[in-house]
Image (tube, coloured by chain):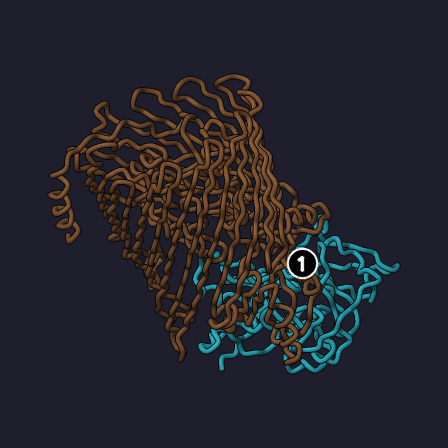
Amino acid sequence: MRFFSLFIILCCGFSALAQTPLPKDSLNPVDMDEVVVTATRSERLLGNTAVPVTLIRQQMIRQSGSLRLNDILGEQTGLFITQGFGRGVQMQGLSPDYTLILLDGEPLIGRMGGVLDLTRLTVGNIRKIEIVKGPSSSLYGSEALAGVINIITDGSGQRKLTADARYGRFNSTDLSVDGATRLGRVRLTGFVNYNSTQGYSLLPNSIQKTVEPYWRLTGQQSIAYDISDRTHFKASFRQHHEDIVNSIVVQNLGSQLLSKGKELNNDYNITPSLSHRFSDRIKTTLRGYGSEFSSRQLLDVAGAANSYNDRFRQRFIRIEDQTDINLGEAFSLNIGGGHILETVRSNRYDSLETERRNTIDYAFLQQEWRATDRFIITGGVRYDRNATYASVWSPKLAVQFRPKSNLRLNASVGRGFKAPDFRQLYLNFTNIAAGSYSVFGSLVAGEEIRRLQADGQIDQVLPAFGLLQDLKPETSTGLNVGLQYDLKPGWQAKLNIFRNDIENLILTDIIAYKKNGGQIFSYLNVAEAFTQGVEVEMTAKSFKKLDVSGGYQFLITADKSVLEEIRGGRVFKRDVSTGISSQLDRSAYAGLPGRSKHMANLKVFYGSESDRWTANLRVIWRSRWGTSDLDGNGLINRDDEFARGYLQVNLAGGFRVNRMLHLMAGIDNLFNYSDPYNLPGQPGINPFLRLSLKNPGKKDNQLSIK
Amino acid sequence: MKINIIRILSFSVLLSVLASCEKNDNGGGNLVVTTQTVRDLPGDTILGINTATGQPYGAGKYTFYSLENNKVVSSADSATAKWDIGFRGTTIITNSGNSGPGQGGGFVFTGLFDDLKTIPADSTFRTDNAPTSYAITSGSNRGWYVYNAPVNLVTAIPGRVLVIRTGSGKFAKVEILNYYKGGVTPATTDSDDIKLRRQRFFTFRFTYQPNGTKSF
């Protein structure tokens, strides 16, 4: 109720200001004249990129009632939201570790278990999201192996003031205020978001909640100053804080032990940049970027004298320059380079006093040749020289051919990589409770094993220990071949066939056994895997105000060494009822866990003639996916080793009361689907209400691309 | 202390002549080796959880078994060659080394039970050196089982055969079929309580070759 009074105040403030309605816009960017920046690190028309690019616009995000980044990404073709270490995104069948998440072009840090938790990101101030599929390490370096998601916030500086409040089930509250103004040559933006929930339990009679209460606060500000027509300065700042209740219940033959605690995460980003256009042909941009992520977990363990206190702090500092050169009509060139310093302190690695660091120097080059109006070739290469692990080259080549004005054929091949993270290099963790196992990072494992050997604690050192060496980055070669066909204005079909071959996959492997039976794990470049599939998307504006779109992805994945073992007849399965073992056929191997073979979505958006009413229906379906091996062969092959596939239907509708006030209501997960074990983040049916106030300013309220 | 009355084992010659009973004529004799299945053999079932370590515990006693006679051997006879294998949780011992005075030994063979018709000549039989090493290697994913921590279940690895040299120096092959009561692994969603109470009940099948050869 206190939020309601806030709105009354805001209403009064807003009503004094003049209003002009926003222009009508298409939800689905079938318009190939839209400008995108992520595919080539420079402004390109969507239709002129030879790599698969998906664009999600603000209007769709708002009409869908999305709050966090995972909400909107989960409704896109081929993207699978994973659960575990928060919400991650699986792209082209590759784990969340392998998709680079950029905020206004700068990489976000603070991955836990390889996952950058997407719930840390509000969508309240996002102007658009660009998704590039396929390796893009030739431009972005590490993590851009499956693809890149670039969240572009609204920094255009068009005067506006908006406020939003959404309230839903479980006291889930989301409040945002977003503003922008212009003072002469200075453009300012400011945004603040508060998000909280009381959490929920999907299992009855459980002390521990499925999702515990949390609250989050995000602030983002930017200042842009046009020093001259040719020289521009911009800086943006972001702060995020989250406070999550943490409780763990241990069962002990009927009695329950409850440990309570908290998880506190903070991140900060600062992004200053200076760009200068020397002439029509040459422009250079110097960008600095500093980011810090810190996490603290406190747990008062039941029955234990000392509370558990886990601390982690990561810093990322980068300076980079990119120069864009136009060599006549047909050629353009992007040259860049930079330096990165990354540091981590954590009591998981050593002590808080020890700072682990890595530096990277890199350079990249991209060249585009527009041979004719119908033929574009883009080639690029990047070199990353790393201080603590092997260096890496990332090349890429993309070709677009337009045999007809409404048909585009695209093909691209590239290499992507993911650098070993600090956990894989330096982790020093021993779990005394659960079987006394230890995990050592590859750079500290040798020393730790020798120390334990000297103490007489080692039973056996395995051959894998001898394989320990400087970790190589995980690399992938990705191939994307596709076409886009424009049937008529507003009607489009897209097809993309992809294959990713991943090498040097870093997995944990047992390197030694302790005399007490405990296992010692470390990280090794041992595995090879592939993912391949087909993605189809269709968009149609069937009536004047009806946008219909649908997408489907078919996906096959496998661990290559498992395939070899199966071919060699060394992989077995066990019948549930008889317990008898038999050989596993290739057809029974379901590939990498956590992947759905089929995923599809259908979206229908309606807007009335006056644009006063809007309504939409979004349907998301995914087939079963492997969760856990139960017959002891370490693979997903039996029906009970899958999570059930499901269909989710989301509905939302909006009504513009007047120029200032907009109301929205929606129901996420209309059919109340839930799966407490495999989808803990899916709370079941979730109705919500949203109230928005806006004043788009007196003039220039039309969104334009800067 | 609660002493579990060891259940009378229902052993069945379940494999019919046609289906799966291996009938071999070895070395000119007319001995027929049969495959027997033992169900729900308790191997130190859980009494509780140690609150300090969080680890479950039982009475700490092995259940000794004679493959030759297809029956449980009293623990009073643990220091004799009368038993062939012993079960205590996931640890399986042979009547060898420091586990017993017999001529036992063993190793874990990778392959199918039915495909193991003759123990390869170059096989090395290991002996027990408890508690650091066992003929039947202990530890998750190291010998005959895998422990899946997230779902808290122990599963016998398919395609693993325990090749056993018995207390009296004869040969047998054993396949562990299940670690839980009734030969049914609890569902992943069952409570930890159920998972604890039902575990350490072995269901296994074995073939014992009484003529001393390594063929089955």
Asked if residue A485 is positioned above or below residue A474 in the image, the reply reads above
Compare residues A8 and A496 and report the one nearer the observer.
A8
Would you identify the image quadrant in which residue A530 lies?
top right
Question: Color used for chain A?
Answer: brown
Query: On the rendered structure, is A47 left or right of A548?
Result: right
Point out residue A219 in the picture as x, y percentages from the top left corner.
Answer: 30, 52
Q: Residue at x 38, y 53 (%)?
A: A270
Point out residue A368 in the picture as x, y percentages from the top left corner.
Answer: 56, 31
Tell how many labels: 1
Q: Residue at x 71, y 64 (%)?
A: A466
Question: Color used for chain B?
Answer: cyan
* Chain identifier of the residue bearing label 1 in the image: B
Q: Residue at x 32, y 61 (%)?
A: A243
Q: Residue at x 51, y 58 (%)?
A: A341
Query: On the rendered structure, is A351 left or right of A602?
Result: right
Quadrant containing the C terminus of chain A in the rendered view: top left
The residue under label 1 is B13
Point out residue B70 in the picture as x, y percentages from the top left corner.
Answer: 68, 68
